Image: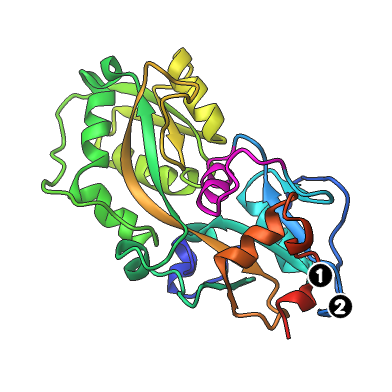
Amino acid sequence: MKSKKTAIGAIATIMAASITVAGMTGCGGAEFSADKNITVVAREDGSGTKSAFMEIIGLKDKPDVPGVIIAAGTAPVMQEVKNNPHAIAYDSLGYVTNDVKILKIDGVYPTVETIKDGSYAISRPLSVVYKPTVIENGANKAFYEFLLSTTAQDIVAKEGYINIAATYEYKVQANLTGTIDISGSTSLQPLMKVLAKEFESLQSGVTVTVAGGGSGTGLKNAENGTSDFGMISKEKKPDDDAPNCVATEVARDGIAVIVNKSNPLDNITLTELKNIYDRDAGANRITVWNRIVK
């Protein structure tokens, strides 16, 4: 799936971003060879995408494999895989561009339909977290109601994400003023910026600021009051860093497994994926492409 503007065929421009490298580096313009080592790319600790991905493939809280490239954000993931013919990575389906190849998982390609019906195995909720008192009145309450309205959910679907069921259209409130601060998941951030802009156009007296930082940041900021709403791209758990907050799902997203476009691989099994990312897989550990590319 192509996200946002790419959903209608345009390829998003990926801005240069820093990548923390733990071992290997990108291979530039080299040709793909199945005899080469797999360049494993992962998100940073605290990323909701990483947390959800590792839990789904059975590696919850496991440390990364040796030589992993840690990409601090969605744009660096795209950049690394685009430029490195031997890379494999995962990221928000709603953010993946035409610059890389999306793999099928156990023969199933990620689409709105396969995520909704559960046949695509790797998906997660995109949610806002907040203290219940935050949405009791004023601009925060109005914005919360907007997020769950057909007005917002139509935008969610248009932007390439999976929308949630909504039963009412948002009604503009006269004389509403205020500021709303939102921070957290970089997977949800691009969509939230679009939603925030629409809300500001409807409620001209309200300013909405949307910042990133990752799901961990979203949880902490909502808990300590730095932000009115935090954004997370995983299930909220009781042991998260926001015990006084609750979560509301505003969209759903698949996690795409991606490789360089020169890679001939089209399908990977969950078991193979786990054995690439599992440092403790022993003899089952997959480190070279010829183990799965024939």
**Image check: 61 left or right of 125?**
right
Q: Earlier in the sequence, mark 2 or mark 1?
A: 2
- On the image, the x and y values in percent for residue 94 come to 47, 59
**Image check: 221 left or right of 33?**
left
**Per the image, is 52 magenta?**
yes
- Looking at the picture, does residue 263 appear above or below residue 198? below
Q: Amino acid at mark 1?
A: Val
The residue carrying mark 2 is 35
- On the image, the x and y values in percent for residue 82 come to 71, 67
- Looking at the picture, does residue 135 appear above or below residue 31? above
Which residue is depicted at the point 27% across and 15% down? 133
Which residue is depicted at the point 32% across and 69% down? 113
Residue stretch in magenta? 47-63
Marks 2 and 1 close (CB-CB < 8 Å): yes
Which residue is depicted at the point 69% across and 55% down? 277
- On the image, the x and y values in percent for residue 28 come to 86, 68
* Residue nearest the viewer, comparing 120 with 25: 120
Tell me which corner region of the image, top left, top right, bottom left or bottom right, holds residue 294.
Answer: bottom right
Residue 14 in view (yes/no): no
**Image check: 7 left or right of 27?**
left
